[in-house]
């Protein structure tokens, strides 16, 4: 049973001024790393809690981490999987597994998102890669384009929820928790969210009559699809098997995975040396967005800790809410709104150090908090009207953002219910401890 404890600290305009300025810059569309950099510089100048000369040193040390090497490697692995079209084999396997039931194509699409999540570690990559492949097939099967887009956007949230996940690497680095431990803890919650999306699609499908697939499971078809996807399945097997068995660290497993994927690509003649510049460029573009945010946000976290902002937040919030249930619901609201307007990385490095003391004040285990936070951020990716996955699918399909957002509402409700279960039943996240 959670218990509530209070603390003593106060926040002033030395904090609220820079924070307000950062909020205005975000609303104006200024890049998030610029916002964080200007806000941190303003905070240090006004409060003098840390010397400004610390900025250069912390920016370097913040990204000089062995754990962070896994991020570009997982991104590159996902890009190799798409380039070699092994992602198509994973989708064919998903279809052979569940495609024979009613609403089978939608169900297999979500299952395919889960398969791809075991490789890419990124929801945006999941949404972009699978959206191109599956949305046209869903529309031909009878799904309205807005709903098909919402389904893929929802399934793609598993990119940050099912291990290996870049988000769990980053939150582990931010809070000093082993990524391997978080991967193991996240396995059951990630599958729960995947099952929730599948069940929601079945219910909506039966109510609306979008798809009328029927048939029976074919062992021969499944066996053939599994054999065709054997190389694609080898990659997540190496990643997760190596991590869970203790053979590899997450970073080492990412290195082995990308080498395996490249070797398979050459062996099957699906990639050429000429493909490498573009693959490296795409991966560098994504990593070039993530790395500066991490470096600057870690400096901001140091400044906030020196100002005792987390302690002050605990005091303010516990003064307003009297029960652990209210605190959990408040944290959930913050995470969903934050996930709605910003990518996972800045949300984690900014909010995790602030919210962890609040979670611990009600007795929440740090690992349980990480699972709760990342899963709640996943809900924000499809939360109307500004969910980032919805924007990805809108860009791919040309469908208006609000049209997709309206069709995503059932998935938002279903995922919120799942997050609440995870929040109030910590054993689901702590089963491996």
Image (cartoon, rainbow, N blue to C red):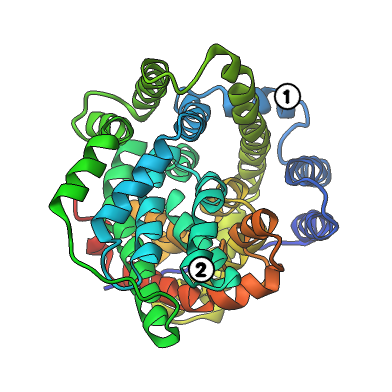
- In this view, the residue farthest toward the top is 273
Regarding mark 2 in the picture, which secondary structure is present there? Answer: helix
Residue 422 visible? The answer is: yes
Q: Is residue 418 above or below residue 430?
A: below
Residue 9 visible? The answer is: no
Residue 117 x, y percent position in the rendering? 40, 46
398 left or right of 431 in image: right
290 left or right of 324 in image: right
Front residue of this view, candidates 64 and 291: 291
Residue identifier under label 2: 331
344 left or right of 365 in image: right
Residue 19 x, y percent position in the rendering? 76, 57
Residue 3 x, y percent position in the rendering? 34, 72
- Find residue 255 and report its image quarter: top left
What is the number of the mark on residue 76? none
- In this view, the residue farthest toward the bottom is 207
Regarding mark 1 in the picture, which secondary structure is present there? Answer: helix
Kindly identify the residue that appears in the image at 38 percent across and 16 percent down.
Answer: 263
Residue identifier under label 1: 56
252 left or right of 167 in image: left
Q: Residues within 10 Å of mark 1 (few under 14, many from 20)?
A: few
Front residue of this view, candidates 13 and 159: 159
Q: Is residue 243 above or below residue 432?
A: above
Residue 246 x, y percent position in the rendering? 21, 28
Kindly identify the residue that appears in the image at 29 percent across and 47 percent down.
Answer: 93
């Amino acid at each position: 049973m959670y218990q509530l404890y209070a603390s003593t600290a106060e926040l002033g305009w030395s904090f609220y001024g820079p924070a307000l300025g950062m909020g205005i810059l975000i609303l104006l569309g200024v890049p998030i790393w610029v916002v964080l950099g200007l806000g941190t510089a303003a905070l240090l100048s006004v409060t003098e809690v840390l010397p400004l000369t610390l900025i250069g040193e912390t920016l370097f040390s913040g990204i000089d981490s062995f754990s962070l090497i896994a991020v570009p490697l997982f991104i590159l692995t996902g890009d190799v999987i798409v380039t070699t079209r092994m992602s198509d084999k994973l989708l064919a396997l998903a279809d052979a597994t569940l495609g024979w039931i009613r609403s089978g194509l939608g169900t297999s699409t979500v299952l395919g998102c889960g398969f791809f999540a075991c490789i890419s570690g990124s929801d945006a990559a999941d949404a972009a890669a699978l959206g191109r492949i599956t949305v046209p097939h869903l529309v031909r099967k009878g799904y309205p384009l807005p709903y098909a887009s919402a389904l893929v956007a929802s399934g793609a949230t598993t990119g940050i929820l099912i291990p290996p996940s870049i988000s769990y690497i980053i939150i582990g680095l931010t809070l000093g928790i082993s990524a391997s431990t978080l991967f193991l803890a996240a396995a059951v919650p990630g599958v729960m969210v995947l099952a929730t999306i599948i069940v929601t699609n079945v219910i909506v499908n039966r109510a609306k009559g979008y798809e009328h697939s029927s048939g029976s499971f074919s062992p021969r078809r499944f066996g053939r699809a599994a054999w065709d996807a054997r190389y694609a399945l080898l990659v997540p097997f190496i990643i997760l098997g190596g991590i869970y068995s203790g053979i590899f660290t997450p970073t080492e497993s990412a290195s082995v995975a990308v080498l395996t994927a490249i070797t398979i690509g050459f062996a099957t003649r699906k990639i050429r040396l000429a493909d490498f510049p573009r693959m490296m460029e795409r991966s560098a573009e994504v990593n070039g967005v993530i790395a500066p945010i991490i470096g600057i946000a870690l400096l901001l976290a140091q400044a906030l800790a020196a100002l005792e902002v987390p302690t002050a937040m605990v005091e303010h919030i516990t003064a307003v809410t009297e029960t652990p249930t209210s605190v959990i619901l408040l944290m959930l609201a913050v995470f969903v709104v934050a996930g709605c307007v910003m990518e996972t990385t800045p949300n984690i490095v900014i909010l995790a150090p602030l919210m962890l003391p609040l979670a611990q004040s009600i007795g929440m285990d740090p690992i349980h908090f990480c699972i709760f936070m990342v899963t709640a951020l996943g809900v924000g990716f499809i939360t109307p009207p500004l969910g980032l996955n919805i924007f990805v699918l809108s860009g791919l399909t040309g469908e208006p953002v609000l049209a997709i957002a309206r069709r995503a509402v059932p998935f938002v409700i279903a995922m919120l219910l799942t997050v609440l279960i995870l929040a109030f039943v910590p054993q689901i996240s702590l089963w491996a401890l």
